[in-house]
Amino acid sequence: MRVCIIGDCGGHIGSIFDGRLGPHTYVGAAASSDLESLEGLGRLALSKTGRELPLFADWREMLDTLRPDIAAVDCLFSHHAEVACFALERGIHVFSEKPAATTVEDLRMLEETAARSGARLFSMLTARFDPWFYTARKLVEAGELGDLLLAGGQKSYKLGRRPAFFHRRETYGGTIPWVGIHTVDQLLWLTGRKCTEVYAKQTTLGNGGHGELETAAALLLELEGGLPAHVNIDYGRPQNAPSHGDDRVRLVGTKGVLEVRGDRVFLINDRQDGREPVENMTPEPIFDGFIRLLQGSDDPMYAGCDGLTATRVCLAARESAGLGRPIAL
Amino acid sequence: MRVCIIGDCGGHIGSIFDGRLGPHTYVGAAASSDLESLEGLGRLALSKTGRELPLFADWREMLDTLRPDIAAVDCLFSHHAEVACFALERGIHVFSEKPAATTVEDLRMLEETAARSGARLFSMLTARFDPWFYTARKLVEAGELGDLLLAGGQKSYKLGRRPAFFHRRETYGGTIPWVGIHTVDQLLWLTGRKCTEVYAKQTTLGNGGHGELETAAALLLELEGGLPAHVNIDYGRPQNAPSHGDDRVRLVGTKGVLEVRGDRVFLINDRQDGREPVENMTPEPIFDGFIRLLQGSDDPMYAGCDGLTATRVCLAARESAGLGRPIAL
């Protein structure tokens, strides 16, 4: 595949070099704004491919000139939707950093464009391709939990120092759409259910000069069938912690309880007592998943992988926190 | 102290025999309804004290006749408030199973009666006297977490077979007031904050013939100062699990993260990386705490130990789930 890259802001773009279904050709890169640097991306591309990554001054011209198969989008979060729409309108498949959009208006535009386009949109919901969450999904699919009673998840990060565009809602989008979307997507993906209502509380306390950046949030969701669900996210993980993140999922069913914690899966049901973790299964690299989707795969692993539904829930959650009332979806 | 006992429904009444500040005299026991049996209590009292527990047919007559120092209340949950009010009106201190009340009307009556009475009300919020939660409280008091950004907790139980009165909201009160109150109280007690708003979702799915009993719930709370908080509770813990419960608390602050899990406390801040648990401290037995309160202790450990605030939050949470909207407190 011929791949163009727009931006290098989110930290996950390197996954386009890690697939095993290539080799692909990385034909050009451009920024979507002058807040973005492509230096690190250029070095990474050189080390991964042995070739210089051609840089372009204007991302629109680059896409129009090169007409790649794939646009890998990792620009300013608030530009994701615009760049994706531009590419999809030209029949270029989009592999995009999440969230798919940072405003409801942009999301609607993207949904309409994606529906019209023959090209595919794929969101970097990287957690689906973590062995522990992938294993959880396989166990749920296998019926190990029975009917679900409760679903919950957590994402906890180290804050460190974030680029200036994280300081403003307008460019960052908010911590629920940026961090929380992984956990929200996990719950939708693992349960196979839509979210029917969401309500959130969040705070910017202790953000150490990061402007409008929210440091923590808690979400209450109702999933289809009246399933209660909860999500908590924070940037409060101390620098001294032994790992960058502390991502969790916990599902309670009529036949068992499953927990993902510390990159391992613990299952308690009539056959296992949860003292020892289940052996992790290995999913394919995320970029290979995207390629398989383009090749026509209908693996349920990819359900909702355009990230539109998870983005909608997260934008509603962010809005609900501002309004002080739940939002029905 | 001379102690009368009313009922034996909740499973925690045995704590009245475990204090070290006695010996106390257990002068009589009665049921509050014909749904209650005192057989187990009689055997327990005999084994703990070496004396037969005198049984009475009518709890009101018992209290009026014996005029004990303390009424230990563990009757049908929906009778807690009525029995407590009867005792408090007579200047008899009350050591009561939680929740303090199962309806808002009963709670208001109890609040008014407790405010008028010279006697004290103490709720069996037993988790405060678990070494792990007690240790968490001491660490928070010592400032190990800095300013709080997020607070959350979990209580997960085995369902098993519950007595018939658990099957009806009218006598049981609901899973949020019965199970969730521990976690709600933990968050109020550990943070030292009031709850300003609550919203809950719950389900009765998979309750195995337990009528109206809710099997799971998720709560979103706002605590004073805009602190987001979340609680999840369930009866979904499999019979095969290695322990009866899986109670947790997690607090995220500007200086650290604390988690109670598996009866141990894990702390990550600039001095600890959370790989090994903190050594648990040992609180006094709960009944001794009650006796110290009667002796005039103003230890902050006992703040809110009448359980009225936690009960109010839980009844509002239960109501919010029915109404489908948050309730301000």
Image (tube, coloured by chain):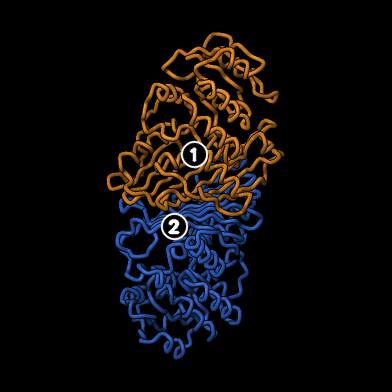
Chain colours: A blue, B orange
Residue located 57% across and 76% down the image: A111
Which label number is shown at residue B7? none
Observer-nearest of A197 and B240: A197
Residue visible at 49% across and 34% down? B307
Residue at point 61%, 23% (across, down): B7
Depicted A247 relative to depicted A275: above or below: below
Which residue matches tag 1? B309
> Which dot marks residue A202?
2
Q: How dense is the environment of label 2, judged by Cα within 10 Å: few (below 14), some, or many (20 and up)?
A: many
Can you name the residue that lies furthest to the left here? B271
Q: Chain of mark 2?
A: A
Kind of element beneath mark 1 = helix
* Amino acid on which disc 1 is placed: Thr
Q: Residue furthest top?
A: B51
Residue B160 is left or right of residue B91, and the answer is right
Three-letter amino acid code of the residue under disc 2 = Gln
Task: Name the side, left or right, on which A110 lies relative to A149.
Answer: left
Q: Nearer the viewer, residue B323 or A224?
A: B323
Q: Position of residue B97 (x, y in %)?
A: 55, 29
The part of the image, by quadrant, that contains residue A109 is: bottom right
Query: Could you tell me residue B68's position as x and y percent?
Result: 52, 15
Residue A270 percent across, percent down from the top left: 62, 40
- Label 1 marks a residue whose chain is B
